[in-house]
Image (tube, rainbow, N blue to C red):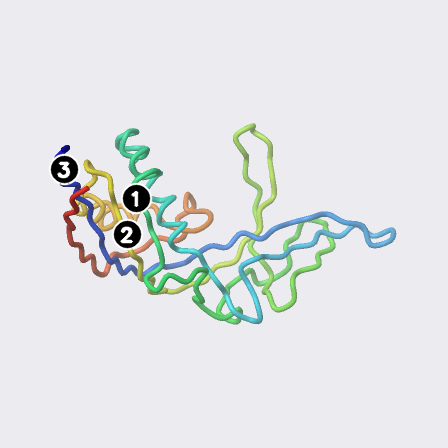
């Protein structure tokens, strides 16, 4: 009879404060009769509230930072690390639409705009994509800080909870969650990280 081999995995609860979360707006150019209009809207606002998916952001962040350090670790994060909101529900409510910050005036791009009701005028700039094409982007900011509590479960034997804690503690202030992180948005501070290792025999 084959012997049961011990398999170790760990789980952790992490609490972070996220600041200046950027939310990109969707954009579509349409016609209203003879008038060309640019319609801006978002999928993360409902009934005057702002919702967010921090577990997805955290998982993507872990994959990105571990890939820069060690590609094989990123592969393990993809397959063997699960992140979820603390109570299991997502997206989570993180603020009111009235807390969103935008530009002082309508973007001066020569377009007529139709902005989703309740949203402030967005920030605007052109960026170059990977093909070198210039594309317009529009975004709003939720200043924060917003406290987010997550659960992390890992079956990756070479990724310890101390490694994840150190990455969050040191790199969260440099590269954050959300949209436009390369512009400095969405940085976070690790407030607490509690982990435990669990032994299973299978």
Left or right of 25 in this view: 160: left
C-alpha separation, residue under disc 2 versus residue under disc 3: 24 Å
- Where does residue 96 sit, x and y in percent of width and height? 49, 71
The residue at 35%/49% (across/down) is 58
Tag nearer the camera, 1 or 3: 3
The residue at 27%/50% (across/down) is 153
Q: Which structural element holds mark 2? A: strand
Q: Say which quadrant the N terminus sits in.
A: top left
Sequence-first tag of 1 and 2: 1
Which residue is the site of mark 2? 152
Nearer to me, 103 or 180? 180
The numbered disc on residue 192 is none
- Asked if labels 2 and 1 touch by Cβ distance under 8 angstroms, the answer is yes
Which residue is the site of mark 3? 5
Tag nearer the camera, 2 or 3: 3
Nearer to me, 158 or 173? 158
- Where does residue 98 sit, x and y in percent of width and height? 52, 71
């Amino acid at each position: 009879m084959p012997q049961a081999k011990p398999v170790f995995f760990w789980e952790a609860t992490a609490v972070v404060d996220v600041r200046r979360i950027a939310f990109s707006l969707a954009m579509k150019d349409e016609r209203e009769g003879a008038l060309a209009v640019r319609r801006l809207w978002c999928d993360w606002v409902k009934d005057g509230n702002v919702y967010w998916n921090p577990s997805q952001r955290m998982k993507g962040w872990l994959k990105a930072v571990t890939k820069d350090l060690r590609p094989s670790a990123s592969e393990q994060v993809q397959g063997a690390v699960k992140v979820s909101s603390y109570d299991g529900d997502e997206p989570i409510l993180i603020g009111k639409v009235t807390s969103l910050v935008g530009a002082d005036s309508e973007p001066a791009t020569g377009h007529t705009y139709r902005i989703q009701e309740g949203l402030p005028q967005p920030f605007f700039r052109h960026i170059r994509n990977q093909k070198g094409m210039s594309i317009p982007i529009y975004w709003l900011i939720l200043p924060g800080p917003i406290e987010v509590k997550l659960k992390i479960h890992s079956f990756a034997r070479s990724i310890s909870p101390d490694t994840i804690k150190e990455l969050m503690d040191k790199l969260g202030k440099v590269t954050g969650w959300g949209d436009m992180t390369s512009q400095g948005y969405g940085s976070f501070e690790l407030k607490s990280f509690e982990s435990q290792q669990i032994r299973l025999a299978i």
